[in-house]
């Protein structure tokens, strides 16, 4: 550290050079009279260093005592005074140096790998070999540096190695700004800099300038500059301008600019350019893209405005307009509060015009809307309370005319759910209240359930003491719980939404369940579990249907009376009851087969879990059922419930006393594995995760006592292929008219459980090559999730996902060379049709596949498609080709056939700041 002392001291300075291991480091020392040395490891640069260096005071070894007058009160140099043994006044003084006007207000630290030399007569510092200097927030690194104390200017330059290659280009970092250049001069006094042949980064963009002037307020002026988002020293493209001004953390502004590609000027000029480099929210215009649609004409899509309203709220407004009169408008506000909640709303309105307005018979208009809302609550906001929403509803034709992505167009079902739940801390109570909605876009059927409420009391043990002493008694394990389920539902066509027909279709019900159970072990391997269940049903509507022989044909007056069904409704409060008693036994059986030591298969283990239960349910339903005649023949009747179709269900009719049985199996294998480090060199392989059969036998029934068998199987082969299957087997025979008779199949000597009436099989798998940058991506994702803008990032990811769905070719991962997703489903139904004269089997099969692969590291081809084996048709298909152009990307999207066909080619920069600077050509075609 260098200090300035008063000039009334003599000057004494000696420079010592220290040579260590062949590296010359010049270290000046200031030596005072007492022999103390102060090395220059860190210095405050002062151009008057040589003039102000003080001479040390000579030490005589005697006490510094002399008669002096009493100093004035204003003399700040006097530290203390006193009287010695001779009576003379002694004054011990320390002179505080005056700081030079040009002394810096902060230290400058510097270091170099090769050498640091201070030339005192010339007042210069020289730093060689990977030199670096830090002053306040400014960090400068270069191969060579020199500092002139007379002018207060630091100059940094590069150098050439023995091969003639330039190394150690000066790099200056200041508060997030980065400058890379050939030569850099910085004045510590004025805090201004002059930089030659510089490359500086601002956010996603780079500015290349022949000369750059940096002002004290960090404002940058560039001469013969270019702005680009390409990170190469010779960029692929740039906006070339004679003058550029950079206002840090705000804007980059240029005068007239020419777009340059591969260093070649183009005839494309712009009068000026403004590039925002701000961080965080900024309101602004969202440029549209030009499209040509066969049905809607030429148009501009996705143009709009982004409104940033702070860290907790923002809104995006987008619209489409077409030459044939169609238009759409979408408002997408998002909101968030850290550690509390986050969500987003999407409101869309669209008007689509078809045909020629001059020809009324061919002209029609479709007005559609869609509402989407998602909300999630942070679990830490209110422990025990959660609230979430996922809403998606709208008109049935909105997706047909306004949505183009693959997943949305092939899905005819949409749904919504809004749920609130509360769990009382330290108590067994739980409450869930929700709204649910489902909608079929093909049939236009809508189902809305609101409110849907469930209140539960978890199992409590009333006979269990708070402090158990000794072995527990059997009655200590008696548990009781309670569940109340309230439902209010309406099923209607979408055209009846908000109308009287919707309210008329409303039905309300409530169900109470009180199960009482306990379990005790028997013989250590068997568990015995008796239970009693009480159920209560409450209804608000009673439905009665009857045959009316005088009812006109289809209700048309004047037609012959062929008869029909009359339906009457009675509103009120109706209650029904149900009681059941059951007891079950369960255990697990293990079996293992061991192979020879020479075999790679060590052993196979089989686990069986049989369950048997007996249950009894008395008939309390006689007053809830009635005889329903459905034709003019008096023998054509059924017993149906007054509450048939109720949303909370109906009590079962008749007395049931029977046995329920089931058998679940698990199959595993141990094989030899070299990867096992435990020493056993074994690896477990699951052959079947589960396969089994269930059914029941009604001891109280007068016929058809044995129920159909339900069979199932599931496995995950090699941890890659998921397979699941299930089916139903009818054990009864059929007569010559294919009517079911009370006789088992095996009674005729057949070795069979029965006839397979229905079955389904599903298979899915996914394969992909290793991601080259998976670790970097995971670290980036973790940093986003842990950062302060996690909620905002989540909302941004939702918007990004929608953009990926709309334009899959523009969002491909070139780090994964190939990827394949496959799924297959098969369903089988074998039943009797009254008009077919026998069994009719129906098989439906569908396979879907999607994936992509890289022809080269820069070319990628992708496909989303499927095949319907029932109709022998190719499903909705989307193909894309992508080309990585380093800082740009080209994508070609093709939907070759179907009711909606599209072709588009897009070339755009990768950087988000220039993403709307795109060349787009689109064609869309409809088959209405």
Image (spheres, rainbow, N blue to C red):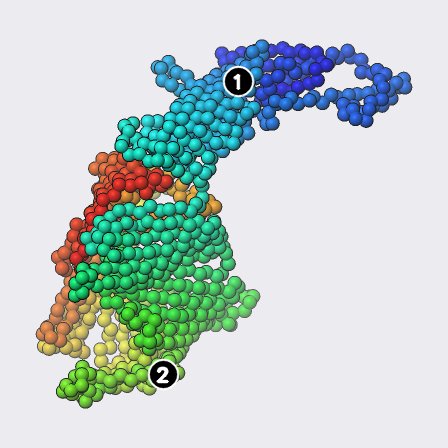
**Residue sitting nearer the eye, 907 or 795:** 907
Give the quarter of the figure containing the C terminus.
bottom left
Question: Which quadrant of the view contains residue 346?
Answer: bottom left
Q: Nearer the viewer, mark 1 or mark 2?
A: 1
Whether residue 916 sits left or right of residue 103 in the image: it is left
Establish if 170 lies above or below 484.
above
**Residue sitting nearer the eye, 17 or 603:** 17
The structure residue drawn at horizontal position 38% and vertical position 54%, both measured from the top left corner, is 332
The structure residue drawn at horizontal position 37% and vertical position 36%, both measured from the top left corner, is 273
Q: Which residue is mark 2?
A: 571
Establish if 428 lies above or below 134.
below
Say whether residue 387 is visible.
yes
Furthest toward the right, the residue is: 87
State the image coordinates of residue 916 (x, y, percent, origin top left): 32, 43
Residue 147 circle label: 1
Q: CA distance from mark 1 to mark 2?
A: 96 Å
């Amino acid at each position: 550290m260098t200090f300035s002392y008063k000039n009334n001291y003599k000057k004494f300075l000696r420079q010592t050079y220290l040579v260590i291991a062949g590296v010359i480091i010049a270290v000046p020392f200031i030596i005072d009279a007492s022999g103390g040395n102060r090395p220059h490891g860190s210095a405050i640069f002062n151009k008057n260093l040589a003039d102000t260096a003080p001479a040390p005071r000579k030490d005589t070894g005697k006490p510094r005592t002399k008669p002096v007058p009493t100093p004035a009160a204003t003399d700040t140099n006097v530290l203390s005074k006193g009287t010695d043994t001779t009576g003379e006044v002694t004054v011990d003084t320390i002179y505080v140096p005056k700081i030079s006007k040009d002394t810096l207000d902060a230290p400058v630290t510097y270091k170099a790998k090769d050498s640091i030399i201070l030339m005192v007569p010339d007042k210069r510092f020289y730093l060689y070999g990977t030199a670096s200097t830090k002053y306040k927030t400014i960090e400068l690194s270069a191969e060579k540096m020199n500092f002139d104390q007379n002018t207060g200017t630091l100059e940094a330059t590069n150098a050439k190695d023995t091969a003639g290659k330039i190394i150690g280009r000066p790099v200056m970092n200041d508060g997030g700004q980065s400058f890379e250049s050939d030569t850099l001069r910085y004045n510590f006094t004025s805090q201004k800099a002059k930089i030659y042949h510089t490359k500086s980064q601002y956010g996603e963009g780079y500015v290349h300038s022949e000369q750059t002037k940096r002002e004290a307020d960090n404002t940058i002026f560039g001469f013969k500059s270019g702005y680009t988002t390409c990170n190469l020293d010779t960029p692929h493209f740039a906006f070339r301008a004679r003058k550029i001004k950079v206002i840090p953390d705000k804007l980059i502004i240029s005068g007239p600019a020419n777009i340059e590609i591969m260093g070649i000027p183009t005839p494309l000029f712009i009068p000026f350019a403004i590039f925002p480099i701000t961080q965080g929210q900024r309101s602004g215009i969202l440029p549209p893209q030009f499209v040509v649609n066969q049905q809607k004409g030429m148009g501009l899509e996705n143009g709009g405005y982004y409104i940033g309203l702070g860290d907790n709220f923002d809104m995006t407004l987008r619209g489409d307009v077409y030459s044939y009169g169609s238009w759409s408008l979408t408002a997408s506000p998002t909101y968030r509060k850290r550690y509390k909640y986050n969500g987003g709303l999407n409101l869309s309105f669209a008007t689509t015009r078809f045909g020629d307005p001059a020809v009324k018979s061919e002209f029609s208009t479709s007005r559609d809307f869609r509402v989407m809302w998602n909300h999630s609550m942070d679990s830490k906001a209110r422990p025990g309370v959660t609230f979430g929403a996922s809403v998606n509803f709208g008109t049935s034709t909105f997706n047909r005319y306004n949505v183009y992505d693959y997943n949305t167009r092939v899905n005819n079902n949409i749904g919504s759910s809004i749920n609130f739940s509360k769990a009382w801390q330290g108590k067994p109570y739980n409450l869930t209240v929700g709204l649910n909605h489902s909608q079929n876009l093909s049939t236009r059927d809508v189902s809305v359930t609101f409110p849907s409420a469930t209140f539960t009391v978890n199992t409590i043990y009333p006979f269990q003491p708070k402090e158990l002493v000794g072995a527990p008694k059997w009655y200590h394990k008696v548990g009781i719980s309670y569940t109340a389920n309230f439902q209010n539902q309406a099923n209607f066509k979408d055209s009846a939404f908000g109308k009287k027909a919707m309210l008329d279709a409303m039905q309300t019900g409530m169900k109470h369940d009180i199960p009482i159970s306990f379990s005790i072990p028997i013989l250590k391997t068997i568990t015995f579990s008796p239970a009693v269940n009480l159920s209560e049903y409450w209804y608000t509507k009673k439905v009665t249907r009857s045959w009316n022989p005088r009812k006109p044909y289809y209700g048309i007056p004047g037609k012959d009376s062929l008869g029909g069904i009359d339906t009457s409704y009675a509103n009120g409060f109706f209650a029904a009851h149900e009681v059941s008693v059951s007891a079950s036994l369960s255990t697990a059986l293990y079996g293992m087969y061991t192979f020879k030591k020479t075999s790679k298969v060590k052993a196979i283990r089989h686990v069986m879990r049989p369950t048997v239960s007996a249950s009894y349910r008395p008939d309390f339903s006689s007053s809830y059922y009635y005889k329903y005649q459905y034709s003019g023949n008096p023998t054509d009747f059924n017993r149906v419930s007054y509450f048939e179709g109720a949303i909370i269900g109906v009590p079962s009719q008749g007395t049931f006393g029977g046995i329920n049985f089931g058998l679940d199996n698990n199959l595993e294998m141990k094989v030899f594995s070299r990867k096992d480090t435990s020493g056993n060199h074994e690896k477990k392989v699951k052959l079947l995760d589960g396969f089994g059969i269930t059914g029941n036998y009604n001891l109280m029934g007068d016929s058809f006592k044995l129920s159909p068998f339900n069979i199932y199987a599931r496995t995950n082969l090699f941890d890659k292929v998921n397979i699941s299957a299930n089916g139903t087997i009818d054990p009864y025979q059929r007569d010559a008219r294919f009517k079911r008779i009370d006789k088992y199949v095996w009674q005729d000597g057949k070795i069979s459980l029965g006839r397979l009436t229905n079955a389904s099989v599903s298979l899915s798998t996914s394969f992909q090559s290793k991601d080259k940058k998976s670790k970097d991506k995971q670290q980036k994702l973790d940093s986003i999730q842990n950062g302060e803008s996690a909620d905002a990032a989540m909302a941004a990811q939702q918007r990004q996902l929608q953009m990926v769905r709309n334009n899959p070719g523009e969002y491909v991962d070139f780090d994964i060379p190939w990827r394949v997703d496959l799924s297959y489903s098969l369903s089988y139904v074998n039943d009797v049709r009254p008009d077919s004269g026998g069994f009719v089997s129906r098989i439906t099969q569908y396979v879907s596949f999607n994936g992509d692969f890289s022809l080269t590291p820069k070319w990628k081809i992708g496909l989303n498609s499927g095949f319907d084996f029932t109709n022998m048709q190719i499903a909705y298909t989307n193909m894309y080709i992508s080309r990585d152009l380093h800082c740009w990307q080209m994508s070609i999207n093709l939907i070759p056939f179907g009711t909606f066909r599209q072709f588009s080619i897009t070339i755009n920069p990768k950087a988000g700041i220039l993403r709307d600077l795109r060349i787009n050509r689109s064609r869309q075609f409809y088959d209405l």
